[in-house]
Image (cartoon, grey):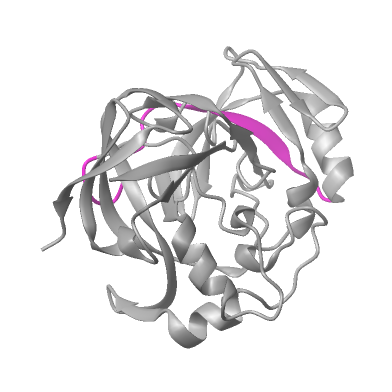
Amino acid sequence: MGTLVALNVHPLKSGAGIPLTEAVLTPRGLLHDREFMLVDAEGAFLSQRKHPRMALLRTAYDGEVLSVNEFVHKAVDDGGVREVTVHGRPCLGVEQGDEAAAYFSDFLGLECRLVRFTGHRATRRGEGELAFADGYPLLVVSQESLDDLNGHLDEPVPMNRFRPNLVFSGLGAFGEDGVGRLRVGETEIELIKPCGRCVITTVDQETGVKGRQPLAALARYRAREFEGQRQAMFGQNAIPRTTGNLKVGDPVEVLEYKA
């Protein structure tokens, strides 16, 4: 048995996360997670990989109004629908208008547009669905995994470097790697594949400044071969198998281990 110790939602893809005490788990992950996205003129998504300043986009969203720093935007659900891409894979977004585009273009110093997810988008594996998340609707990490990593660093990093939706304690360091299925509160999730980490982990989420750690340390001791690529692994991508309410403090029970 373990415990759910943190919940985080990211209404704007690559914007700052919001810690929650309670959340609704839907088939696409936590309600409103990665519901909005910034795209360039070609419709390709923007992220902290190339634009670390996006970490400074502090968000709040109640299902109707998206607030980002001082900018307040009434979500548009009847605007023009355009094709956009996440890692080259096409999906659909509803245009959120010129005022939003002007605000984000000015903030980032480049022309971009804000879109809101619509339609259906399937995961590559596991028959799940998601909004604008990279590939899976949930990212889960054990607190002990971060504690272990910080033992390899001169300066510890907070969990928000990894932008997880669910953080557990009680599974042990990298215990999530061996788990196939979990009951979390009244819901069940399936852990599908390890998460190969990218340069976003090197962006300080408070300042938007990029460094070298913790990716360099992960590459030294957590590099694994997966699907023909050698990647620095940290956390697991997961798919909800049942939905419901979650709250910090919920029990976490291992239902299945991976073969």
**What main secondary structure does the magenta stretch of the protein show?**
loop
Left or right of residue 164, residue 3 in this image: left
Left or right of residue 57, residue 187 in this image: left
- The boundaries of the magenta stretch are 110-127
Which residue is most to the bottom? Answer: 220
Which residue is most to the left? Answer: 259
Residue at the (66%, 76%) spot, across then down: 213
Q: Is residue 11 visible?
A: no
Give the percent coordinates (x, y) of residue 240.
29, 35
Give the percent coordinates (x, y) of residue 130.
39, 37
Give the percent coordinates (x, y) of residue 131.
45, 35
Q: Is residue 69 visible?
A: yes
Number of numbered discs visible in the structure rendering: 0
Give the percent coordinates (x, y) of residue 167.
47, 47
Left or right of residue 58, residue 220 in this image: left
For residue 10, above or below residue 159? above
Residue at the (43%, 56%) spot, across then down: 142
Camera-nearest residue between 50 and 64: 64
Camera-nearest residue between 178 and 109: 178
Q: Quadrant of residue 255?
A: top left
Quarter of the figure that contains the C terminus: bottom left
Answer whether residue 244 is magenta in the image: no
For residue 108, above or below residue 214? above
For residue 252, above or below residue 66? below
Residue at the (59%, 49%) spot, across then down: 44
For residue 219, above or below residue 117? below
Camera-nearest residue between 147 and 54: 147
Q: Quadrant of residue 215?
A: bottom right
